[in-house]
Image (tube, rainbow, N blue to C red):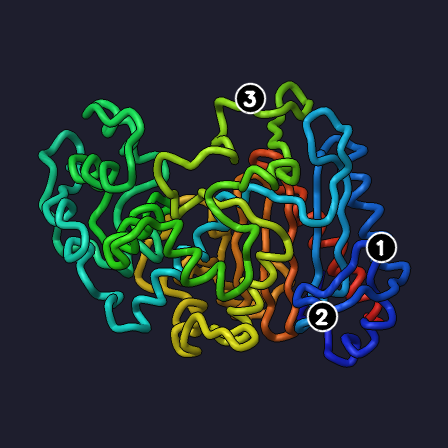
């Protein structure tokens, strides 16, 4: 896969060479006929389902503002009787993080938030947290405060297993909200000093609480007012309206070599409001909505007549902020990390330096390569399926190269 070798000369051929029966412009354009290379991509989506690798997949390829391919295969429901259709609603899990980052950055543009602000300025309960001592030594005091930057880039000192929900329950909050969770978090020591290590964590959930404090309203309302309504992402949210529940794709998990539905009690009910709004993993969305979100960022913070962020703020978000940090875990896989997205700092994975994106725990993934104006989006509902998204990206990359004559 050599995405960076795709030239705009090939893109000029794409409107007449690409598309498929479900194709449409992410920004409201019309469908276009397609050619053999992307027909093979569509067949591979169908093969994923036939092989049992996934049971519902939807994939999109966009060059500039033109949606040149969108294919889907499988079923929306667990029984396999309802074919996956355009407008399907997926749990995007950690692809919520870039949206939370954008919401927080709107306050930075307004002068109400700075990356070097102590988090305790907004969440006083976190002013005196300790750092876990080594080898049975006493817990240590902070060498410096947790900063807002640490929340954006996962360097606050928590990890994703930090048991703040358990502690909140032990304190009597059986259905804790975000404020109660942060209070519980204040009693738990950090794993390391803030600003010393990148480790995938609950930091974006905490950032969601900072947003609530700044806005003086719940996170879902902030998202709606500052992002979803202006961008017309009206199928994205923490809850699915009753009239749209028949569009929600069932979530599966592999057990004994087979994909089985996740029991209803083990996953949030899309029909019910969550106890707390998870800025790190709580949203439902559609391909069309998420492509509008990426289009806004590609447009320097603007889509159509709606400006969400200043151009310089978008540049700040999409550059690497991990310099000087030890990298813990495998989530970055050689990439850097910006403010809510992974960032390619060199030519890797077939992508240009400066490419950015992220993924979700149910096998969703997106990335943008600005050098060739390429966006890819993969929607899936197979828990911890990280193979299918890159299988699609590999096939789609080869299709683009073939059309470009590479």
Callouts 3 and 1 close, C-beta under 8 Å: no
Of 197 and 367, the residue lying toward us: 367
- In-image side of 213 versus 35 (left or right): left
The residue at the point 13 percent across, 49 percent down is 124
**Residue 281 in picture, x, y percent from top left:** 44, 43
Disc 3 residue crowd, few under 14, some 14–19, many 20+, Cα 10 Å? few
Q: Quadrant of the N terminus?
A: bottom right
* Quadrant (top left/top right/bottom left/bottom right) for the C terminus: bottom right
Q: Residue at x 28, y 56 (%)?
A: 150
**Residue at horizontal 36 percent and vertical 39 percent from the top:** 160
Tag 1 residue:
21
Estimate the spatial distance between the alpha carbons at disc 3 and disc 1, rounded to whole Å. Answer: 33 Å
Q: Give the left or right position of residue 320, taking residue 120 as reference.
A: right
Query: Residue 263 — which label?
Result: 3
Q: CA distance from mark 2 to mark 3?
A: 39 Å
Name which quarter of the figure residue 400 lies in.
bottom right
Q: Taking 57 as reference, is 146 left or right? A: left
- Which residue position holds label 2? 66
Residue 388 occupies quadrant: top right
Is there a contact, CB below 8 Å, between mark 2 and mark 1?
no
Q: Is residue 225 above or below residue 296?
A: above
- Is 136 placed above or below 354 here? above
Callout 3: SS: loop
Looking at the image, tell me whether mark 3 or mark 1 is earlier in sequence order.
1
Near mark 2 (Cα within 10 A), the count class, few <14, some 14-19 or many ≥20, is: many
């Amino acid at each position: 896969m050599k995405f960076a070798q795709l030239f705009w000369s090939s893109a000029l051929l794409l409107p007449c060479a690409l598309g498929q029966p479900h194709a449409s412009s992410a920004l409201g354009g019309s469908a276009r006929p397609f050619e053999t290379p992307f027909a093979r991509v569509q067949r591979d989506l169908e093969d994923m389902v036939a092989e049992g690798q996934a049971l519902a997949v939807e994939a999109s390829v966009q060059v500039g503002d033109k949606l040149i391919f969108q294919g889907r295969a499988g079923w929306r429901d667990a029984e396999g009787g309802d074919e996956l259709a355009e407008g399907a609603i997926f749990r995007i899990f950690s692809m919520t993080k870039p949206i939370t980052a954008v919401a927080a950055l709107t306050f930075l543009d307004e002068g109400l938030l700075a990356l070097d602000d102590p988090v305790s300025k907004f969440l006083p309960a976190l002013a005196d947290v300790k750092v876990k001592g080594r080898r049975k030594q006493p817990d240590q005091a902070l060498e410096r405060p947790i900063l807002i930057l640490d929340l954006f880039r996962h360097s606050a000192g928590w990890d994703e297993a930090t048991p703040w929900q358990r502690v909140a329950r032990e304190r009597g909050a059986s259905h804790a909200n975000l404020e109660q969770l942060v209070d519980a978090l204040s009693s738990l020591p950090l794993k390391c000093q803030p600003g010393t290590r990148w480790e995938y964590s609950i930091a974006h959930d905490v950032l969601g609480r900072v947003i609530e404090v700044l806005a003086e309203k719940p996170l879902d309302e902030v998202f709606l007012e500052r992002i979803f309504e202006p961008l017309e992402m009206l199928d994205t949210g923490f809850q699915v309206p009753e009239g749209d529940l028949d569009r929600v794709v069932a979530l599966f998990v592999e057990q004994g070599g087979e994909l089985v539905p996740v029991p209803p009690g083990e996953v949030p009910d899309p029909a019910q409001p969550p106890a707390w709004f998870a800025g790190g993993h709580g949203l439902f969305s559609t391909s069309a909505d998420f492509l509008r979100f990426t289009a806004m960022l590609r447009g320097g913070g603007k889509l159509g007549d709606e400006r969400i962020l200043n151009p310089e703020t978008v540049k700040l978000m999409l550059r690497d902020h991990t310099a000087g940090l030890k990298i813990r875990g495998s989530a970055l896989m050689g990439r850097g990390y910006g403010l809510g997205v992974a960032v390619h700092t060199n030519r890797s994975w077939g992508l240009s330096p400066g490419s950015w994106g992220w993924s979700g725990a149910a096998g969703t993934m997106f990335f943008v390569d600005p050098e060739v104006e390429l966006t890819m989006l993969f929607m899936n509902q197979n828990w911890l399926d990280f193979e299918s998204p890159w299988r699609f990206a590999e096939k789609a990359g080869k299709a683009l190269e073939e059309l470009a004559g590479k």
